[in-house]
Amino acid sequence: MRRIWLTGASSGIGAALVRRLLADGHQLALTARRSAPMAALAEEFPGRVLLVPGDIEDAGALAAIAERIRREWGALDLLVLNAGTCEYLEPGAFDADLVERVIRTNLLGTSSCLQAALPLLRAGEQAQVAVMCSAVTALALPRAGAYGASKAALRYLFESLRIDLAAENIAVTLISPGFVDTPLTRRNDFPMPQRWPAARAAAYIAERLPKRPLEIAFPLAFSLAIRTLGHLPAAWRLALGKRLARPPQEH
């Protein structure tokens, strides 16, 4: 049984992964801004669910959450950094505030979670950090500049941290999904090839996490395709992007 702190636990991949990890017998501390969706789990799995709601952009709240986990469990064995957001930049309407919002949540909020959790992981057994990245970091896509930049930054940050944390035997696993059926992706108004149900994605992740892999990427065909396209010459990638792009908005 592992002691796990999971962020973004109230919906999407996070909620599905919570149920799978609880079914596998683990203890979970659950963080999300909305506590109501998680409350029933505490009753369904007595003694194995610790509700620690909060906003990952609030460093003070994260420090309090980490302190409560320390008092209850003493340590963490696995940190799943799943919380995140997605907004799209519309052609002809660049929005620096939008970029800041996405970076603040996906990169800075995730970094604050890690800072709060590291002392607990150092006291854990076979400690591991798993961070939700994205397959889109392999290929620049239209409108995805803010989201892709935040996830690309996460990838670099945690691949670098993997080196730094190796001496402490803390493993770092990147999770790189393609399209998954979640409340965020249901707002998308474009085709999403090979979209997986959240439960399938959660099962795939949960089965592989104990092996402490460097990366968990899925669907495999989609991941291979987008990485192959990402290695095309820059002019070819630009031509592909133009075919996918929308015309600029009128002002």
Image: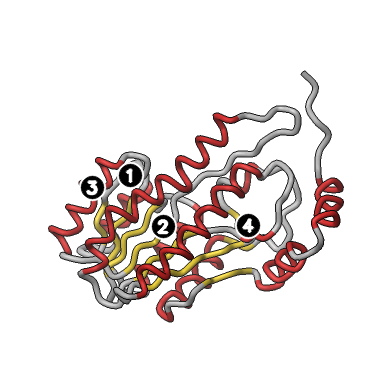
The CA distance from mark 1 to mark 2 is 17 Å
Residue 157: x, y in percent? 47, 58
The CA distance from mark 3 to mark 4 is 30 Å
Q: In screen coordinates, is 90 left or right of 168? A: right
Identify the residue at image location x=57%, y=54%.
152
Q: Residue tagged by mark 2?
A: 81
Amino acid beneath label 3: Ala
The CA distance from mark 4 to mark 2 is 17 Å
Mark 3 vs 4, N-terminal side = 3
Residue 182: x, y in percent? 56, 52
The CA distance from mark 4 to mark 1 is 31 Å
Q: Residue tagged by mark 4?
A: 137
Q: What element carries label 2?
A: strand
Amino acid beneath label 2: Leu
Q: How crowded is mark 4: few (under 14 residues within 10 Å), some or many (20 or more)?
A: many
Q: Quadrant of residue 179?
A: bottom right
Mark 2 vs 3, N-terminal side = 3
